[in-house]
Structure formats: structure tokens, C-alpha cells
Amino acid sequence: MGNAWRGVLRSWAITTVAAASGAALLILCVDPYDTGRVPGVGLGFTREQAPRAAHASRARDPAFDAAIIGNSHAQLFSPARLDAATGAKFMSLAIPGSGLPEQKAVLAYFLRHRREPAKAIVIGLDEYACRSGPNARNRLQGGPFPFWLYAADFWTYARGAFRADVLEDAVAALLGTEHPAVLAGRDGYWNYEIGRRWRGPDLEGAGPLPLAEQPGPFPGLAVLRDMLDAIPPTTSVALVVTPVYAKFRPRPGRPAARAETACKDAIAAAASRSNVTLLDFRRDTRLTRDPRSFWDGSHLTQAAAELIEAAIAQALKRPAS
């Protein structure tokens, strides 16, 4: 009886190891997110459309030398329009719902895959950069994120890739099944206006949209400084504090207004570099007073995005020393 059980356990162990090894080899060879981790293997494309994973393929494309980093508040900044205005070749690496930790990982991945230093980087900043108060560090990230996918070392990637959902994606990619609808082009531009009817900000259904809750400290700005440190000094950088509808901004003199000023001052200190220009659109201006600039309290329309892009292009044309 003992020998029989030992045989069963031995067979089970061998089968388990063989299955796990086969699954790992399949994931590695198919490379379902087109990371190019091992030269010469992989299908050379990814079916993935969700930006959190799709950018692993997109961000290593050598055809691009500039990038837009941010979340949905920077999503309508158009690579094509910035290309025409600056002469650089932009891709959008915006990830809806993301915070600075996720954006830092994607930016680092993009920079590692450039043969020459990037020409330009645009970083959109919003309330995620100004998280403050208790547990602020735990609220910098927007949600679950595959940091392993963008890791610099192979073994962190390999450990993260060895999971059931990645295996499922590898099999689906290999078989060519259930190909998803394309949300974005190769330059990453995903226009959330398509198929929607503009109604404007809902003044009754939304409350104030403060940039910061307290006047510091702002742990997210340490992440921002790390991001700026990683960017070559010859790369022109535009930091864009994205706008909100003026009626949703805090009233002057209120605690939220003082907290906003404190965070903006801290952002300006972090941005004090020769190759960085800070553009603050979270102010009371004609753009922010116009409800046609927004889909809701904070998401831009195309018209507003184009106005901001013009300022970005001017900032990026200033030579970096």
C-alpha cells in the first residue's frame, strides 16, 4: 500500500512539475503582451487593449520619441496634434484611473526602450499627486496594476507572468480567438468622446473637486521627483496640472484652497529643473469657466484639449539646457 501511494505521489509531482513547466514555457514563447523579453520569441503582437497591459507592447516601439503620461485627465491630449506642433513623434501612455506609481513604472519602461534619449515627455498631474493626510501613501495608486509587466529585471517579470490569467491570454493569442475591438491606435490615442453626446458638467450631481485635502505632506511628489530624475536632462518636459470646471474649485480662503496652493507650491519646487516647464491649468480662466471645456467636472473636451496642447507645444519648444 505504501509503495502504491508513493507511486501515485511521484506521478502527481511529475505531472504537476511538467504542467507548470509547460505553462511557463508557453507564456514565455507566446509573450502575450509583446514585451520582447526574450529576443526571437513571441508572436510579435498583443491582443490586449486595456492600457495597463497594452502599453507594454506600445511603449517599446522605436518609432516614437516622445510620450504623454497620465490618466484619463490627460487622455484627450492628441499625439498626432502634438507631433504636428513640435516635430516629435508622440505616443499616449495614459492609463485611466491611474496614479503616479503606475505612471512612474510605465515612464521608466518607455525610457529604457529608447535607443536615443526621448525628445519630449508630457506628464498630467491631478489630485493623485496631492494626496495628503492619513494613509496618503496607500492612496497614491489608482487600482490594481501589473508592475511586474514593466519591471526592469527579467525574473520579476517571469514571476509575475506565471499566473492563470496570463496563461489564458497566451492560449487565446496563440489560437487567435476572441480578438477584442480596437480601442486605440499604435500611438495609444483613445478618444473617449466617440459615441457620446455632450451634456456638460452636472452642477447638482457633483461636489467640489479639491486638488488637495490637506496642506501636506504630499508623498506623491516624491514619486514625481523620481520620475523627473529618470528623464534625461536633454529631454523637454511639460508638467501639466490638469483643469477642473471653475465652479467646482474651492473658494479662496477656504482650507481646500490653502491646501491646493500648498500642493502647487510643492509641485513647482519639484519641477525646478532646467528642462521642465510647469503649466498650471487648474485656475480661474476663460477655459475653466466655459462648461463646453468639460464632459463633467474634470474630463476635457477635444476643444479644451487642443487649447492646452498649444501651450504644451510652446513649452516643449523651449530648448532644454
Image (tube, rainbow, N blue to C red):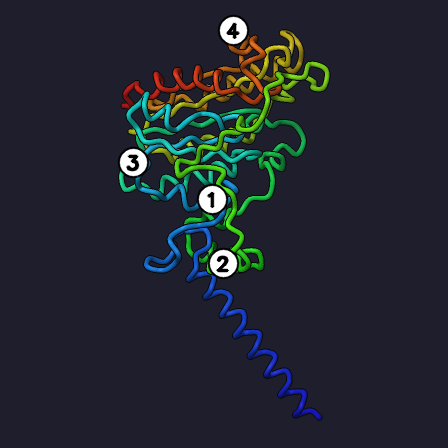
Q: CA distance from mark 3 to mark 1?
A: 22 Å
Q: Residues within 10 Å of mark 3 (few under 14, many from 20)?
A: some
The answer to whether 82 is drawn above or below residue 18 in the figure is above
The answer to whether 174 is drawn above or below residue 2 in the figure is above
| Residue type, numbered disc 4 | Arg
Give the residue pinned by disc 1: 54
Name the foreground residue: 1 vs 252.
Answer: 1
Name the foreground residue: 110 vs 295.
Answer: 295
For the point 61% across and 16% down, which residue is it?
Answer: 200
Q: Residues within 10 Å of mark 1 (few under 14, many from 20)?
A: many
Q: Considering the numbered disc 4 on the image, is that residue within a helix, a strand or a loop?
A: helix
Give the residue pinned by disc 3: 117
Mark 3 or 2, which is nearer the eye? Answer: 2
| Residue type, numbered disc 1 | Ala
Q: In which quadrant of the rendered image does the C terminus lie?
A: top left
Q: Considering the numbered disc 3 on the image, is that residue within a helix, a strand or a loop?
A: loop
| Residue type, numbered disc 2 | Ala
Give the residue pinned by disc 2: 170
